[in-house]
């Protein structure tokens, strides 16, 4: 019974593979004809931009032309591979492993199948090869593992990397020659050869400016509780303000504890030993004075927060009484 199943599956695999390969070949030919018309139209538009002196737009549009040309070249190779595999379908049916002479063609079709959405038949062919050779064989081709056998030209043409400046300049010159346009490419060459390191320096300066703009906000955060003295007319806002006013008092107590620890550490380490130690004691005394000033400001802020909290509580209680 298993032998009959193998023979039946073998015949079904061959029939499906032939059907999908024929559909893929015919679809690729139609897409190539369609892309030929699109490429001619796009080249004509770029020639008009070059003639009008709008080189900036032409430098951007030429990337679309290069992309379409790469896809067209990849489709041409895939069409040859599909025809080659179609001629060897009887060999694929009779052999359990992938033949060495068909490995490059089959692996290239498997690799290109998810990258060529215009040809869904390649995905069906990939599924058939998955059933025939297993998931490991298909994963090796899809992930470009060593000795996967995928054609290098297919990999390059279907890559999503941006084209280099030399390639774009070459295509622009070919378009200018094709439409007989006297185009001076010196400006475009200078633009493509320009180094963009100055953009990185500008980003650093911007980030430095952002950090400077954030530093005053930290100092002004200590005075923020004083702005909450004005009572609200709604009970929901009163609750939110009361919760927000409890946080600064806790942070101020923690800062006071940290300052006391700093004072204790300075007292323990305060051993006279010459000019160097006198300088350190002067610096430590300066730090302690700043710390005391910070504690005093924190105390004032906490007192203001408590007063605001008491005011909120009283207003909240009065609102409750009025509601009753």
Image: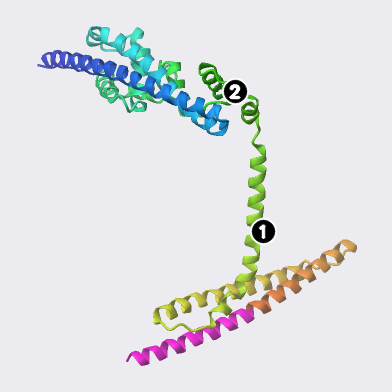
Q: Mark 2 = which residue?
A: 183
Q: Confirm whether residue 144 shows in the render.
A: no
SS for tag 2? loop
Which residue appears farthest toward the left when viewing the image?
1
On the picture, is 170 further left or further right than 287? Answer: left
Which of the 4 image quadrants contains residue 106?
top left
Q: Is 321 rendered above or below residue 70?
A: below
Figure label count: 2
In the rendered structure, find residue 256 and report the number of the disc placed on it: none
The numbered mark, 2 or 1, whose residue comes first in the sequence reads: 2
Residue 23 sits inside the magenta stretch: no
Q: Mark 1 = which residue?
A: 212
Residue drawn at (23%, 16%), measured in percent from left and top?
A: 17
- Magenta highlight: main SS: helix
Residue 306 sits inside the magenta stretch: yes
Which of the 4 image quadrants contains residue 322?
bottom left
Q: Which residue occupies the foreground of this view, 45 or 220?
A: 45
Q: Confirm whether residue 27 shows in the render.
A: yes
Which residue appears farthest toward the right when viewing the image?
274
Callouts 2 and 1 close, C-beta under 8 Å = no
Q: Is 11 rendered above or below residue 110?
A: above
Q: Quadrant of the N terminus?
A: top left
Extent of the magenta region: 299-324
């Amino acid at each position: 019974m298993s032998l009959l199943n193998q023979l039946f599956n073998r015949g079904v695999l061959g029939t499906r593979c032939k059907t999908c390969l024929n559909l893929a070949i015919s679809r690729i030919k139609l897409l190539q004809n369609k892309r030929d018309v699109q490429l001619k139209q796009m080249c004509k538009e770029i020639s008009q931009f070059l003639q009008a002196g709008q080189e900036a737009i032409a430098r951007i549009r030429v990337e679309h032309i290069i992309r379409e040309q790469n896809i067209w070249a990849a489709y041409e190779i895939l069409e040859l591979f599909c025809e080659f595999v179609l001629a060897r379908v009887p060999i694929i049916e009779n052999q359990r492993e992938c033949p060495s002479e068909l490995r490059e063609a089959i692996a290239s079709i498997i690799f290109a199948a998810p990258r060529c959405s215009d040809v869904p038949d390649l995905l069906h062919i990939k599924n058939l090869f998955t059933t025939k050779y297993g998931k490991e064989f298909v994963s090796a081709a899809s992930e470009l593992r060593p000795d996967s056998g995928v054609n290098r030209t297919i990999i390059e043409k279907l890559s999503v990397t941006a084209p280099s400046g030399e390639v774009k300049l070459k295509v622009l010159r070919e378009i200018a020659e094709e439409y007989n346009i006297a185009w001076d490419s010196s400006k475009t060459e200078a633009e493509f050869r320009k180094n963009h390191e100055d953009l990185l320096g500008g980003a650093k300066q911007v980030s430095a400016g952002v950090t400077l703009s954030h530093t005053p906000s930290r100092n002004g955060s200590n005075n923020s509780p004083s702005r909450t003295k004005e009572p609200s007319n709604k009970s929901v806002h009163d609750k939110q303000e009361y919760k927000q006013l409890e946080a600064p008092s806790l942070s101020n107590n923690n800062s006071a504890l940290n300052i006391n620890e700093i004072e204790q550490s300075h007292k323990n380490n305060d051993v006279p030993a010459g000019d160097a130690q006198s300088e350190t004691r002067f610096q430590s005394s300066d730090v302690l004075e700043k710390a005391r000033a910070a504690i005093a400001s924190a105390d004032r802020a906490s007192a203001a927060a408590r007063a605001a909290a008491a005011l909120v509580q009283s207003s909240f209680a009065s609102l409750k009484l009025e509601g009753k």
